[in-house]
Image (spheres, helix red, strand yellow):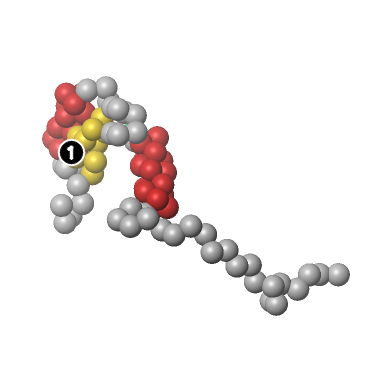
């Protein structure tokens, strides 16, 4: 006995989406930010992050830029892409 789903599609009108802001998108971004934050090296100060960024450049020729993180309040290094 399996229920048929085809004739009974669920209809959910839901609340109207607010203009200008997409809460779903913002939430998705927040999750992404948090995951990125957790995966990255953490620095307490900009100086620390900048010091390692300099090391990256001199040691491995990688271009890194320190940025303040909204999630943890610390600093991380962002890798600059080729079209930065
Ligand atoms: Zn962070």
Q: Residue at x 41, y 41 (%)?
A: 35
Q: Quadrant of the N terminus?
A: bottom right
Does residue 34 appear in the picture of this structure? yes
Q: Element under label 1?
A: strand
Residue 36, relative to residue 19: is it above or below?
above
Residue at image location 24% in from the left, 41% down from the top? 78
The residue drawn where x is 21% and y is 28% is: 49
Q: Position of residue 24 (x, y in %)?
A: 42, 52
Is 13 left, or right, of 31 in this rendering? Answer: right
Q: Residues within 10 Å of mark 1 (few under 14, many from 20)?
A: some
Q: Where 13 sits versus 56, above or below?
A: below
Q: Position of residue 64 (x, y in %)?
A: 19, 40
Q: Nearer the viewer, residue 29 or 59?
A: 29
Any part of residue 59 in sight: no
- Read off the residue under disc 1: 65
Task: Residue 9 in the image: state x and y as whole percent.
Answer: 65, 71
Location of residue 13 in the rendering, given as x and y in whole percent from the top left corner: 54, 64
Cβ of mark 1 under 8 Å from ligand 1: the answer is no
Residue 28 in the image: above or below residue 64: below
Left or right: residue 36 compared with residue 11: left
Extreme-bottom residue of the structure? 7
Q: Which residue is found at the position 19% from the left and 26% from the top?
A: 46
Answer with left or right where residue 17 lies relative to residue 66. Answer: right
Which image quarter: residue 33?
top left
């Amino acid at each position: 006995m399996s229920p048929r789903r085809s004739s009974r599609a669920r209809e959910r009108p839901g609340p109207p989406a607010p203009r200008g802001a997409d809460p779903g998108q913002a939430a998705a971004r927040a999750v992404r930010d948090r995951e990125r934050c957790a995966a990255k090296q953490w620095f307490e100060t900009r100086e620390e992050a900048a010091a390692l960024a300099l090391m990256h450049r001199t040691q491995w020729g990688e271009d890194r830029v320190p940025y303040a993180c909204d999630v943890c309040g610390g600093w991380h290094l962002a890798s600059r892409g080729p079209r930065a």
